[in-house]
Amino acid sequence: MLAHEVLEDLVQVLGRENVLTEQEDLLTYAYDATAAMKHHKPDVVVAPLSTEQVADVVKIALRHHVPIYPRGSGTNLSGGTIPIEGGIVLSMLNLNKILEVDQDNLTATVQPGVIIQALNDEAAKYGLLYPPDPGTVTTATMGGSVSECSGGLRGLKYGVTKHYIMGLQMVLANGEVIRWGGKTVKNVTGYDLVALFTGAEGTLGIITEIIVKLIPAPEARKSILAVFDDIDKAGRAIAAIIRNKVIPATLEILDNATIQTVENFVHAGLPMDAEAVLLCEVDGYKEVVEREAVLVERILKEEGAVQVKIAKDDKERDLLWLARRSALPALAQKRPTTVLEDATVPRSKIPDMLKAIRRIATKYNLQIATFGHAGDGNLHPTILTDERELEEMKRVHMAVDEIFETAIALGGTLSGEHGIGIAKMKYLGLEFGEAGVAALRRIKEAMDPNYVLNPLKMVRRD
Amino acid sequence: MSVYDSLDSITEELHKCMKCGNCMAVCPIYKETRKEVGVARGKISLAEYILSGEAEMTKGMADRFSLCTTCMACNTNCPCGVRFDKIILAARAEAVRKKGLHPVKKIAFTALKMQRMFDFGMKAGSIFQGVALKNAPSRHSKLARMRVDVGIGKEKLFPMLSKKTLRSEFPEVVTIKNPKMRVGFFTGCMINYFYTDIGRAVIEVLTENNIEVVIPKFQACCGIPASVNGDVDSACSLAKRNLRAFERMGADALVVACSSGGTAWKHVYGELLENDHEFKALADKWAKKSYDISEFLIHQVPFKKEGLGRVRRKVTYHEPCHLNRGQGISKEPREILKSIPGVELIEMKEPGRCCGMAGSFSLVHPDLSVQISDRKTADIQTTNTDTVATGCPACRLQLQSGIENAGFDREVLHTVQILAESYRVGK
Ligand SMILES: Cc1cc2nc3c(=O)[nH]c(=O)nc-3n(C[C@H](O)[C@H](O)[C@H](O)COP(=O)(O)OP(=O)(O)OC[C@H]3O[C@@H](n4cnc5c(N)ncnc54)[C@H](O)[C@@H]3O)c2cc1C
Ligand code: SF4
Ligand code: SF4
């Protein structure tokens, strides 16, 4: 339980209406989108209206030794917002203004509670685009996606969140406010704290303002579907496209289990017996797009696709992407619990990874469907299960362990885009070794010696 | 086991929710409050805590479950197919079982149930209105504003009670020569007491299409205001009364012109009366032949196009949640509007977004209701139109009230009124 003075101090700074203390409200901040994760109720939820108020909250927390758990929309998949030690949940949703779109410098300045899609809607008015597009564009906040360094479908050509973050204002663990980076393309002044805070999962400081890079929205796009009867051929096709110096905006793969589920769900005309389908989109100037689409079509055929189809019009295109976007929802309806991983390997190892996942599914007798951003080597093995079946959940955990081990052995990483949070903390040693984990901890302790900010996430406290 | 009987009935529904938060993108309440408890995911988690025994159904819980316009937008946007409409009904029924009805709602529902009292209120209406409400200047419909704030805010505009109820204006059977069909008209309260002009338009259009209209005197409130707020007993007795009323008069089909009435006859009565064999059979029988007026005119009649006169209106169409998502009727009203000569249909941004009325929701959460309405009003204002068409009297009230408060000029009508107008002009 929180000392009474803490609540009084918080109310004094934020006013009654932005401090939630009733059980019925607190219980709704005990979880996030992470599956099969124990929930924890916070002691209080606060929703500040300004950077100054955020700084005041941090100072109060520091004074009373109470942990702070920053929260955007709570859609992360690694337990990043769960207040595992109670304390204060800091909702950033009231800081939700787009402060500026700067057409001359191609930047936008936003508060962290802005929803990604809202920024894109605003940018679109100027013919501009903010490319990072996680599956949650219409719900996730800018602060949350910067803190997770979210990826999405366009990663292959356009990169991920970190490639678009130019400057940050942040409240440090001691309550001081700093600005780093800015609107300049070049900036080598000091350590790159902007890069450090991007993907820090709220463990180093609280982001209160973000300057992002925008790009001109591409003029045209074309989507291509390719069907394979062999996973290896699909893998070779991915490599061949890139080798031919075409960088599609998007290059996605669905395995057989996913295809069957999706096809039953949306009837997009995917062949049920295919081993894999690749979905590719090229974008840019009209003329370039025409040329690249034909080239991609030829490469896919040469690499042994049994069927290649270029979407004729927007309707066909939308149907293809509906199929891709329905992958997770369709799978999620099959069993009550959906464990979605994002182990990532070098692009060339995609066939090995897919085969390993299939082997693991058989070994532990589990339903695993895999889809994902093949062009980025970022796969989403999705385990369909039921968290009430305890014996099955044990097998799920063993399978997850083995998926991670395989990814690392193939030269990959634990997480491509969903973050470490609570869920993957124990695997860090696999990737960094003990010395690496210790280095991570020293950075945490340099910035937040008292473990006030999102404690017990990403960094172990010994 | 129906959702009205016990919270256990939704266990599987709750388990389907993967907490992805997609519902946040569309929830009108969450958009305003930005609090997790406003969105489906938050209320689902509360129901889970209650079922697992981790939390109890407190008065505070009941208050949280009242935070929902039951607009069903979350249903449509949910990747896991969670039927939140069922969850909220079950949670509210549980809340009433454990904690009783919210006082404001209690007054409203008992009045609805006691129809005689309501009818008396109508007769005394002019006096009552003089005391409590003052006329709000409006060019289009009679709206009134509360003189004193009785806990529901003074912002909200109310329609003036009509001089005569619709059902007293017409005989029980509106006969015509050689009818091709006999149709029962379930008026619902708002059309009977306030918006009698919608009711007249329904009768006009049906008779114009050579259909005999039966308006059973004994019919009552549809019961939805009670059932969505967990007052299952009242809802059941209203359902039975209505079924009896229409069964006694008999009809080839039943039409409604409000979205709650349609929902009641098509879906809710069967569920409410699941454990009553005799009435369950009746409910199922009538459910099969119940239609919204626009659905009926497009698919069952189809309504005659000759004789339609020119109506010069630029119209934008607002989708009632329980007509669009609740009954899948969205193309039909537009088809009617487009077939009327002179009518130009101009879509607003997000026509399917909830207007925030949601029956008694607007009484219990007046401020939120107005905030939600303001967004709708702004969307309407940016269309270059002179008329707003919709398919539900409750939406009509909310939209007109929002427009009057914003101080611009649009006439809000039920789609069928514009069709009736066209037949009239064509004569
Ligand atoms: C269905 C589904 C699909 C998804 N698809 C993708 C995908 O394609 N690609 C992808 O990368 N991710 C995906 N995700 C994961 C998730 O949507 C992203 O990580 C998202 O960007 C998180 O945003 P949020 O606002 O919900 O953040 P939260 O979940 O609220 O927070 C995420 C982390 O950021 C911290 N934080 C939040 N705000 C701040 C702040 N202002 N300052 C400091 N720290 C802060 C929190 O403490 C937490 O550690 C998906 C999730 C779901 C449920
Ligand atoms: S969209 Fe559906 S599954 Fe996702 S949180 Fe909302 S109700 Fe649950
Ligand atoms: S029904 Fe509407 S108001 Fe209720 S939770 Fe769903 S989206 Fe929100």
Image (spheres, rainbow, N blue to C red):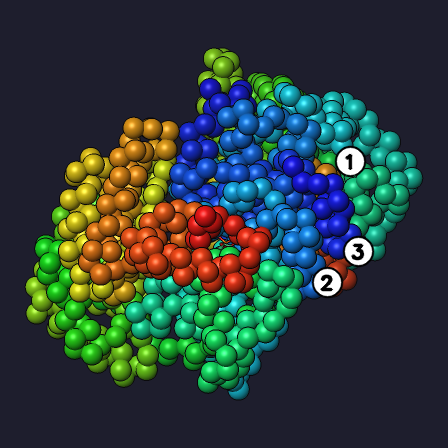
Mark 3 crowdedness (10 Å alpha carbons): few <14, some 14-19, many ≥20: some
Q: Position of residue B373 (x, y in %)?
A: 67, 53
Q: Position of A426 compared to A367: left or right?
A: right
Amino acid at the residue labelled 3: Ser
Mark 1: which amino acid?
A: Lys
Mark 2 vs mark 3: same chain? yes
Residue A434 drawn at (x, y percent): 34, 55
Task: Please name the residue shown 27% across and 50% down the image.
Answer: A404
Label 1 neighbour load within 10 Å: few <14, some 14-19, many 20+: some
Q: Which mark is residue B138?
A: 3
- Label at residue A339: none
Name the residue tied to disc 2: B409
Could you say where residue B6 lies in the image, as x and y percent from the top left? 53, 21
Between discs 3 and 1, the one toward the N terminus: 3
Horizontally, residue A67 falls left or right of residue A214, namely right
Ligand 3: does it lie within 8 Å of the C-beta at label 3?
Answer: no
- Determine the image quadrant of residue B158: top right
Closest to the observer: B96 or B70? B96
Whole-Å distance between the Cαs marked 2 and 3? 9 Å
Asked if the residues shown at circle 2 and circle 3 are in contact, with their CB atoms under 8 angstroms apart, the answer is: no
Look at mark 1 in the image and give the residue it sits on: B164
